[in-house]
Each structure stands twice: as structure tokens, then as C-alpha cells.
Image (cartoon, rainbow, N blue to C red):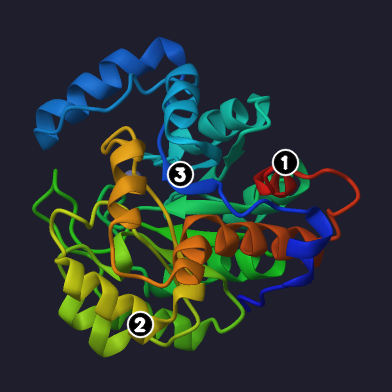
Amino acid sequence: MCSCNRDLESDSGLGAHTVIDFHTHVFPDSLATTALASLRKRSGIAPAFDGTVAGLGAAMARAGVATSVIQPVASKASQVRPINDWLAALDDPRIVPFGAMHPDFADPAAELARLADLGFAGIKLHPEYQSFRPDEERLEPLYSAAAKHHLIVFFHAGCDITLPSMHSDPQIFARLLDRFPDLTVVLAHMGGWRQWDEVLHHLVGREVYLDTSFTMPYLSERRFCEIVAAHGAQRILFGSDGPWADVTSEVACLGGLPLAEEARQDILWRNAALLLGSRAQQKGDLSSGGAALRALPN
Ligand SMILES: [Zn+2]
């Protein structure tokens, strides 16, 4: 799992100065205003753009982001298919959608097979919005199908600023990694929002990717760099959580950290390009122009 194919870098002629944002949210135009107003009220956070695909595109252009990965959250099982149908119809070469999934969805194996056929690179799960523990037995068919189809499983990790619940922690994710060694897992918020002591204890050095989103104001520079050094920069992915943070500021934040330039470029784009590219290669997508390949910047 998580095998990086360094050849992709030279083969694709990737430039050294680009950004892949692995963690963004968008909504259909008809829902964006209402969805953002409701989430803004619950979180107290002013969104950095209007939550539409066009708004995301403009934020990307301002920040020099080549590719954004969409991480949709289905708060009910009935939303999974409609969200995935909407994402599958998005036709923007700068956008790589992950699919929505929900632990209560009746036949996850069939939907994951469909997503894989459609060229999706992964799925998103949110233990707090979806009220589940990531190590529950009932998720076995879902994880097995994700591993079978080489779909990356992206988790919200740690508590959510809008909810009092706590369904995941680094120890739970460590158990999941033990049980599903073939699963490619990304944990948002550097492995667990406000659980960074436990991340250092249970997750660093494991075969798991951590994203940088929503950490900078809460995690000190020293602690952030400590996790990067302990885990390895090659398994850290840049994510903004836009519109809940301004991607331009997040890129600038990363630019200001005392990291080696090679490590910074790994985090900003190279790891994501290799991860999405190697997944496409495993799936045999390289010549068919699957969605994952859109992540490779031109
Ligand atoms: Zn998010």
C-alpha cells in the first residue's frame, strides 16, 4: 500500500512549483448558499469562498493551485448516490472528486465498484457527521471493497469544530491500519484534530497519509514540524479544507515553516501526484485518462 512511483514524476514532466489541495468542499450551485450559511452558523467560521465549483476555481487561481480534490460528506445514506452522480458529472480538469459514502449505505461494495468504474480515486468518510467508529465490524465490506478497487479512503480525523461528539482517535485508526494493511488511508487534520499527542504516539511512522488541513492556528509550528519529521514528509499531503480556510493563506503558512524545500514540495504537490498517479496505475487507468490523472499538473 501507499507505494510511491517516483518514475511518474520524471515521466509527466511535473513542474516544481505547483500545489495540489487534497481537501476541499463544494456544493451544487442551488445548495451552496444555504449549506454554507448553515455550516457558518454552526462553526462560527466565515467561508473563504462561496462553496461553488466556480468559487473554488477562483480561489485556486489566486493561490496557484493546479488541482483540488473534493471531499464530499454525505450526512445520510440516501445522499450518497445523488452526491456521487453530481460529482461524476463535474467536468473540470482541475478537479478530482472523491466519492461520498456512508456507513449505513445498504450496498457499499456495489457503489464502490461503480465509483471505481467512473474513475473516482477514493471515498470520504466522516466519523462525526456520520456517527460511527472507524473500526466497527460492519464497515468490513466497505473497506474490503475500497482495497479491492484501489480506492483511497479519506477520513475526517479527530473532533469536528461544529460537533461535541468524538468517534475516532489515533488508536482506533491504528487498529484499522492493522486490520486492513492493503487499504490506502488518508487522515485529515494531521491524523486527529486536537489529538496530536496521540498521533505522535500511535500513528507516526505508520503506512498512512496525514493532511495538513485546519491545523496551523491550533498546532504550533514546532509541533507541526515534529510530526512531519517523525512521520516522514513523503506521507504528508497539503489540504486547505476550503472554503473553511483560505487556501492562499494555508500555502503561505506552509511556506513559512522551517522545513527543507524538498519536504515542502513533497507536501505541497509531489506526494499527492504520486499517490493519485500510483492508484491510477494499479487500476490500469494510465492510458484511459481516468479522473486520478487529472491530478497530475500540466
Ligand atoms: Zn473538511
Within-10-Å neighbours for mark 2: few <14, some 14–19, many 20+? some
Residue type of the residue flagged with mark 2: Ala
The residue under the point 57% across, 67% down is: 141
The residue under the point 36% across, 70% down is: 259
- Residue extending farthest top: 30
Q: Is residue 229 visible?
A: yes
Residue type of the residue flagged with mark 3: Gln
Q: Nearer the viewer, residue 176 or 199?
A: 199
The residue under the point 36% across, 18% down is: 32
Q: Position of residue 138 (x, y in %)?
A: 44, 68
| Residue 164 disc label | none
Whether residue 126 is situated above or below residue 175 in the rendered picture = above
Query: Does the CB distance between marks 2 and 3 fall below 8 Å?
Result: no
SS at circle 2: helix
SS at circle 3: loop
Q: Position of residue 247 (x, y in %)?
A: 35, 39
Q: How far separated are the C-alphas under marks 2 and 1?
A: 30 Å
| Residue 71 disc label | 3
Query: Does the CB distance between marks 2 and 1 fall below 8 Å?
Result: no
Q: Position of residue 288 (x, y in %)?
A: 89, 45
Q: Earlier in the sequence, mark 2 or mark 3?
A: 3
Q: Nearer the viewer, residue 29 or 204?
A: 204
Q: Earlier in the sequence, mark 2 or mark 1?
A: 2
Within-10-Å neighbours for mark 1: few <14, some 14–19, many 20+? few
Whether residue 283 is situated above or below residue 42 in the rendered picture = below
Residue 89 picture quarter: top right
| Residue 229 disc label | 2
Whether residue 51 is situated above or below residue 154 in the rendered picture = above
Q: How far separated are the C-alphas under marks 2 and 3?
A: 26 Å
Label 1 sits on residue: 298
156 displayed left or right of 195: right
